[in-house]
Amino acid sequence: MRRLLLSLALFAATPLAAQPVTLSEYDASAYGATEFANSGAEAAQDAFLRGLLMLHSFEYEDAREAFQEARRIDPDFAMAAWGEALTHNHPIWQEQDRDAALAALGGDLWTAIEAGDPIAGVTEREWDYLMTLHALYGGDGSKEERDFAYADALGALAATYLDDLDAAAFYALSILGTAHDGRDFATYMQAAAIAEEVFAANPEHPGAAHYLIHAYDDPIHAPLGLRPAAVYAEIAPSASHALHMPSHIYFALGMWDEGAEMNVRSYEAAKARTDGRGDPLNGHGWHALQWRAYAELQRGRYDEARRLLTIAEELAADNPRRSYVPILLRAHVLVNIEDWDSDLARTSPDLDDDWLTLAAQSLFADGWAALRRSDRAAAEAALTDLGNRLEAHDGPEAEDKAPYLQLKALLALDAGETDEALALLTEAAELEDTMPLDFGPARPVKPVHELFGEVLLGLDRPAEARDHFEEALDRYPRRSRSLLGLARAAMQSGDRATARTVYADLAASWHAADASLPPLSEVREHAAMGTY
């Protein structure tokens, strides 16, 4: 992994100075708190600070409007131009609109940045901030190369201005943005170490809490994220993304009630915001809707998950660019509820020819549903369709190839070719094991080790099945189908003590489950049983 300019040793040796926190009304109640000295007009300060705080919570559109408001008040406000340009760079999501960013800066300012020729009216520190944009948006390098250059530039900025918490926070975020191939712990922990310094110096800083959650939202590090998760929504309660983010930690720990609650709040905030403007639901609202539905599936609230799917379908009818959300939700609903003969299972969505990951999840769910209702021809058609898409795609990812191998294994098992099925599942599991630990709803939509365990359980091999369910739970803690499989495997192996413990854990997740949930009586009965 490439070494970044600023070493963590510098931060360890020279802790960031705590700043006095003075909160305006909107800081305290809506978006958090920070201080950012600048040379803009006094009348433009509220809009600028609001934009900066929103930027730290990825409320990019609203932040852009705030920075534009500051520039209307003070047309020469260079740092408002800097903030507006940053709203077009989304490091965590690996997205960047370079042309829009340069347009936001304007020709004269960008020309000065490219030339390294400081403009009049800005401080040396402000000019240093502006020059980091040259690393981010300038030159002929690829986006990935510019991401590393930007992280180096922000590292130098943070090292120069050790009391500047925003410089440090943006540096932490830029490090996360260099993880182009997905999470790797060394990169994420480097970012976390810097964000921790900011969080300690200003517990009201939205970027500190936000970036710590991103750094820690995997099953191994998630306990470290409980501190920022507990406060981020209170720091920035008007930012729908801030209301969603604690669920990254809660999902990574299988805390489904808390995860569902945060996404209810996030969705409602996003919808109120967009409804009030007469706009379609924004991306934050769609994201919260999707995550909440997954949490409801894990809580055994299948009727509620179906209702949320219906909402997503209705919203997508008026916003086709978001049609992927109900397609993905449908796949999750199918493989969790396992209602194979329902109208939902029999109606396949139209799939984008270019979006392989979405097609892989959907076609796996379709093929498995068809196979379970004895429609082998439809299952084979789904497998063929997915195979053709994989062949047409340059370098498919593990999460795209695994569903193909899973469906192929299920077809082999259905044909009585047990050894072939287990070999295919082994190959798929090895692919899953190469994937970085991630956050949120399961990917693939049916975790490979979970399916492998269910297949082995059906073959009366509970000891082997147990190993796979435990592997699945390492990646997706407290996922309900994996807990159910592990409890059954332990019971079939004669380990009643473990079975009772796992059933009790699942019963806790299902404390508000639908009364009609098929395994509910089994779970509650065994959760209450004695161990001997």
Image (cartoon, rainbow, N blue to C red):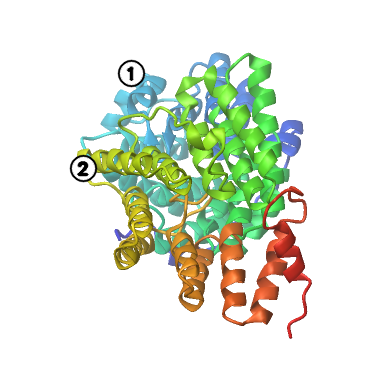
Residue 263 on image: x %, y %: 66, 41
Q: Nearer the viewer, residue 51 or 223?
A: 223
The quadrant of the rendering that contains the N terminus is bottom left
Q: Residues within 10 Å of mark 1 (few under 14, many from 20)?
A: few
Q: Secondary structure at mark 2?
A: helix
Question: How far separated are the C-alphas under marks 1 and 2?
Answer: 45 Å
Quadrant location of residue 429?
bottom left
The three-letter code of the residue at mark 1 reads: Gly
Q: Residues within 10 Å of mark 2 (few under 14, many from 20)?
A: few
Residue 394 in view, yes or no: yes
Quadrant location of residue 38?
top right
Residue 99 on image: x %, y %: 33, 24
Residue 406 on image: x %, y %: 37, 55
Q: Residue at x 32, y 48 (%)?
A: 148
Q: Residue at x 64, y 15 (%)?
A: 277
The quadrant of the rendering that contains the C terminus is bottom right
* Left or right: 451 as drawn, with respect to 73: left
Q: Which residue is mark 1?
A: 107
The residue positioned farthest toward the bottom in the image shown: 532
Q: Secondary structure at mark 1?
A: helix
Q: Report the disc number at residue 440.
A: none
Q: Earlier in the sequence, mark 1 or mark 2?
A: 1
Which of the two marks, 1 or 2, is nearer to us in this view? 2
Q: Nearer the viewer, residue 523 or 46?
A: 523
Residue 378 on image: x %, y %: 37, 39
Q: Which residue is mark 2?
A: 391
The three-letter code of the residue at mark 2 reads: Glu
